[in-house]
Amino acid sequence: MGRKTKEEKGLLAKLLSGALDGQVGDDLTTSGGSTVWTTIKDGKPVRYKEGPTKKFFNGKENERIPGVKHTLEEWNTDDEKLSFLQKFGWLMKDEDARKYSSIFKPKK
């Protein structure tokens, strides 16, 4: 990506500071019953998938076994993080992230 604009440096600093930590967008439930979500933790965006919860009767009561959690995608480098903000920033509560993302929104 090369040189970063003042805006990009500011967003990366905000990301690193933890100011943008939290879930990005809504959970998505697949046709198989798995849940997919994206979150920012400690300034690092990550997408997870958790398999459906299984239930079984143990002779006395129904027991639930949580699905297996997988990491689908991680955005580690500054360029990857900026690419994440370009693509998903509009889903965030942060005004700067939304504004930055809107620059990269595809034209209809």
Image (cartoon, grey):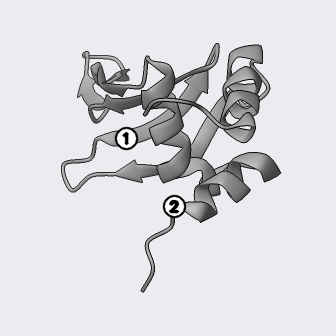
Report the residue at 43% width, 72% height from top.
106
Residue 7: percent from left, percent from top: 73, 40
Residue type highlighted by circle 2? Phe
Residue 51 figure quarter: top left
36, 20: nearer the viewer: 20
| Above or below: residue 86 compared with residue 38 | below
Please name the amino acid that badge 1 sits on. Val
Q: Quadrant of residue 103?
A: bottom right
Q: Is residue 50 left or right of residue 88?
A: left
Examine the rendered structure and indicate whether residue 35 appears above or below residue 105: above
Label number found at residue 102? none
Locate residue 35, reporting x and y percent. 36, 41
Q: What is the distance, in whole Å, between disc 2 and disc 1 at their CAs? A: 24 Å
Residue linked to disc 1: 36
**Does the residue at mark 2 contact the one at mark 1 (Cβ under 8 Å)?**
no
Between residue 45 and residue 85, name the one nearer to us.
Answer: 85
Taking the spot 25% from the left edge, 24% from the top edge, the residue there is 57
